[in-house]
Image: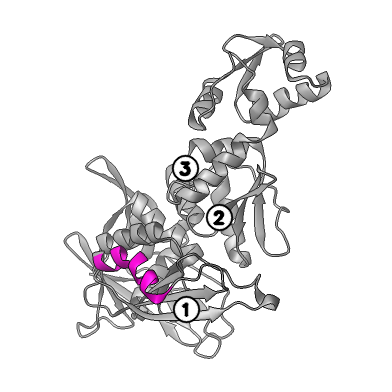
Amino acid sequence: MYFGVPCESIDKTSREVKAEVVRIFSERDMLLREKGIFKNIDGIKHVNLMAVLASEFHTKTARRENGQVKLYATEIGDKLYIFPRVFVMNKQPVITNKYIPLQDFAALLGFYLCEGKKAGTFSITNSEKEVMSKFLEILCRNFDLSNFSKYCILHYVVDGREDKTEEELQEYWRDLLKKYRLKINLIRYSKTKSKDSKKKIRAKYGIFTFRIFSTSFLYTILGILNSPLKEKLITDEELSWEILRWVAAGDMFPKVCKGKLNAVVIATENSNEVGFYKKLLRGCGVRYESNNVTKNGEMLINGLDNFVKFTTKDLFKYIEYRKQKFLKGLTNLTSIKFLRMLGEEEFKLQNFSEVARMRASIASQLLNHHYKRAGLVASRGGAFKITALGKELMNFIGVKNAH
């Protein structure tokens, strides 16, 4: 049994990816789309990859209408064999698990969305060894990569500030390379000039790129990324937060000004990605102002209520240095410092105003607008009291209440 799945095509001139509509071949696949997206296996929530791929979708990223490529799949046991173009056995199939753990699926969707190449060959780029190692572990756990050619490149920018030698770079990435039996095929050195110093990103140990030379593998990943079920998947809050954590490991970072957290930024220049990120944030219950996008394509997420959600949901779980920067900036916020003054007992507005040494109008706005919206305090009959969430936040960032 086989079915048509989202097809992708590449315009060889423009190098842009395009999707066409491929009809569903069986009623069973339609049922999978609507009812079989998730499945619990041994108490762990899994995503049915067949249901994700067996769906129609549209996109408007190509300039031409030719060059259609179809994918076909057959189910053997708990594996899917995905073939490009025509269903014949002399084509190298992509072999994957039929059911992928929810957290692994979130990594494929979130991390490749922000760090992956969308045309040519499967390619993922990042400068953090721990993040790349974990992503490759997830990839190898769910896909059989043994029959595909793999290629690794390290791009290193030289600017005269403690530049690393090739031996030092090889040593830094050695554990990851050994674990997955890889080798760095090429190390590119480039010098930063004063006029373009802002354009070139200098990573301490270079920017690592992992490639798989297989168009069918790329098309399979693009089928996941472009499936219309992606919109339905992000209505699941648990999955949405896991996707966002992987976006945070790539193109999401805390913006700190004068030691205080100012915003959390998602860096993107693709308008289609901006639309998806907005829906993803909504699925996570994060408040986002639709016009809060800079000229550089950065989405700015502000607000104490959002910062609290990011803290309790451990947004920067997979990238430790950003997590520490975020928590330090959050701890230094004036509103958090005032929160330390709230004890276990109920208190009045006037009491808080006097202890914090601020005007009653400002104290009222802080309590009724910022703290209450963030769920840090509750009020009843004119009296306020710190909530369990407020206490949890204090414990999470390592701040003890003053009383």
Would residue 343 be visible to someone looking at this image? yes
Residue type indicated by callout 3: Glu
At which x and y percent is residue 20?
48, 76
Q: Residue furthest bottom?
A: 13
- Give the total of numbered labels: 3
**For residue 190, above or below residue 350:** below
Which badge, 2 or 3, comes first in the chain's sequence? 3
At which x and y percent is residue 163?
50, 71
- Camera-near label (2 vs 1) is 2
At which x and y percent is residue 167?
36, 74
Give the quarter of the figure containing the C terminus: top right
What distance separates the C-alpha of mark 2 from that of mark 3?
19 Å
What distance separates the C-alpha of mark 2 from that of mark 1?
23 Å
The answer to whether residue 279 is magenta is no
User: Which residue was labeled with disc 3?
Assistant: 237
User: Which residue was labeled with disc 1?
Assistant: 119
What distance separates the C-alpha of mark 3 from that of mark 1?
30 Å
Would residue 27 be visible to someone looking at this image? no
Badge 2 density bin: few <14, some 14–19, many ≥20, Cα 10 Å: many
Camera-nearest residue between 114 and 132: 132
In the rendering, which numbered label is found on residue 252? 2
Which badge, 2 or 1, comes first in the chain's sequence? 1
Q: Which residues are magenta?
A: 165-178
Residue type indicated by callout 1: Ala
Camera-nearest residue between 213 and 41: 213
Query: Circles 2 and 1: CB distance less than 8 Å?
Result: no
State left or right for residue 240 relative to residue 130.
Answer: right
Which residue sits at x=49%, y=80%? 189
